[in-house]
Image: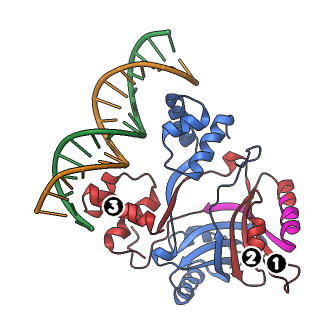
Chain colours: A red, B blue, C green, D orange
Amino acid sequence: MLDDEVDRAIVRALREDGRTTLAQLSEVSGLSLSAVQVRVRKLEARGVITGYRAVVDPESVGLPLTAFVEVTPFDQSQEDDSPERLRDLPGIEACYSVAGNANYMLLVRVASPRALEELLGQIRRAASVYTRSTVVLQTYFEGRPVAAPGDPDK
Amino acid sequence: MLDDEVDRAIVRALREDGRTTLAQLSEVSGLSLSAVQVRVRKLEARGVITGYRAVVDPESVGLPLTAFVEVTPFDQSQEDDSPERLRDLPGIEACYSVAGNANYMLLVRVASPRALEELLGQIRRAASVYTRSTVVLQTYFEGRPVAAPGDPDK
DNA sequence: TGTGAAAAATCTGTAAT
DNA sequence: ATTACAGATTTTTCACA
C-alpha cells in the first residue's frame, strides 16, 4: 500500500521513467532529496517497487512473434504444478492462472512460427497440457503505466 | 537488430536491472567504460532500448484485479480504429491486435470487480465493441526477460 | 520523518593513441 | 576501441532538528 500523495508521485514518476533522479523526484514530490531517497528505499523494501527494467523492443532482439497461450491440463484430477514446470522454458514472459476455460494464460515471445511450434510442444510435454494460442499481429501499446485509483492521470 | 555478443550482454543486463551502471556493463561485456557508453546510446537511438521503467506491484498501488479483455467490433464492415479510441481509457495497460475470433486483446488493471464492470462499459461505448473478459486469479510471473535466440540463458 | 551539507560514486564529454 | 582526464551530476552518508 502507498502511504500518501508523496509516495504516489514518486511511484508515478518511476513508472514513467525508472531512471528519474532523486533530484527530480524531490521536485515532483516537494520533499527534500534525502527524504525522497528514504521513501524510495522503503518502497523497494516494502515490495511496492519490485525492480527496474530496461524496456526492449522484442523485434530488435530477434523475438518478433508474440502470442497468448491458454493452457489446460489433460488430467484435471491430478495436482497441478504447471507454473513451476513452465518457469524454466525459454520464451515465456508471463504466466497467470485465470478464471475461464483454461487454467493458465501465458504470454510468449519467439523468433518465428517454427519456434512457436517448438515452444508449444515443450509446454505440452513439460506440463501435460492442452494449449490454445492466439497470435499477436500488432502491438499498439504495452506496459503502459496505469494510473492508480485517486491518482490524477496527467 | 543487435550487432554482436556485446550488445546482447548489455541488453540482457539492462533488462534484468535497468539501473545497471556503465561500470558494471563494462565488466559483463568486457568492453571499456567509454565504449559501453557509446553502445548504450546507440541501442537507445536505434530503438532497441525504448525506455526504463520501475516495476511496481499492482496490488500495492490499488489495482489488485487484472484481466484480459478480448475486443470485437459490432460492425466489422466499418473502419476500425479501436486502439485509438481505447488509448486514453484508464486501466488499459496493453493493447494488441490478434489473430483469432477477437480483433484485439487488452490487458487491464483495475481496483475491483465493480471497476472492471465500469471499464468494460467504457470500452464498449468508446469503441462500439463486444468484450469477452478473462479474469486473472494469480500472477506467477510477469515481464520476465526472455532470452533472445542464440543468447545463453544464464 | 524530515533537512542540509559533505563525501563518494557515476556519468558525460573530450582528447590522444 | 582503449585509456586518461576533467567537470557536472547523482548517490550516499552523516549530523542534526
Check if mark 2 and mark 1 are on a common chain: yes
At 73% from the left and 76% from the top, the residue drawn is B76
Q: Are marks 2 and 1 in contact (CB under 8 Å)?
A: yes
Chain name for mark 1: A
Vertically, is A21 above or below B105? above
Can you tell which of label 1 and label 3 is closer to the viewer? 3
Q: Of callouts 1 and 3, which one flags the residue occurring earlier in the amino acid sequence?
A: 3
**Residue A92 rendering spot, x and y as whole percentages:** 73, 61
Determine the image quadrant of residue A104: bottom right
Quadrant location of the N terminus of chain A? bottom left
The chain carrying label 3 is A
Q: Looking at the picture, tell me which residue is in the foreground, A153 or A77.
A: A77
Q: Amino acid at mark 1?
A: Thr
- Label 1, label 3: how many angstroms apart (C-alpha)? 45 Å
Quadrant where the C terminus of chain A is found in the figure: bottom left
x, y percent for residue A53: 54, 54
Q: Which chain's residue wears label 2?
A: A
Q: Is residue B32 above or below residue A22?
A: above
Image check: B8 left or right of B64? right
Q: In screen coordinates, is A54 left or right of D6?
A: right
Which amino acid is tagged 2?
Tyr
Instruction: Bin the neighbour count of mark 2 within 10 Å (Cα to Cα): few under 14, some 14-19, many 20 and up.
Output: many
Horizontally, residue B6 falls left or right of residue B17, namely right
Disc sitting over residue A38 in the figure: 3
User: Which residue is at a point 56% across and 47% down the rendered structure image?
Assistant: B14
Which residue position is annotated with label 2?
Answer: A104
Magenta segment, which residues?
A119-141
Is label 1 in contact with label 3 (beta carbons under 8 Å)? no
Secondary structure type for disc 1? strand
The earlier-in-sequence mark between 2 and 1 is: 1
What is the residue that sits farthest to the bottom in this orientation?
A: B114
Numbered badge on residue A72: 1
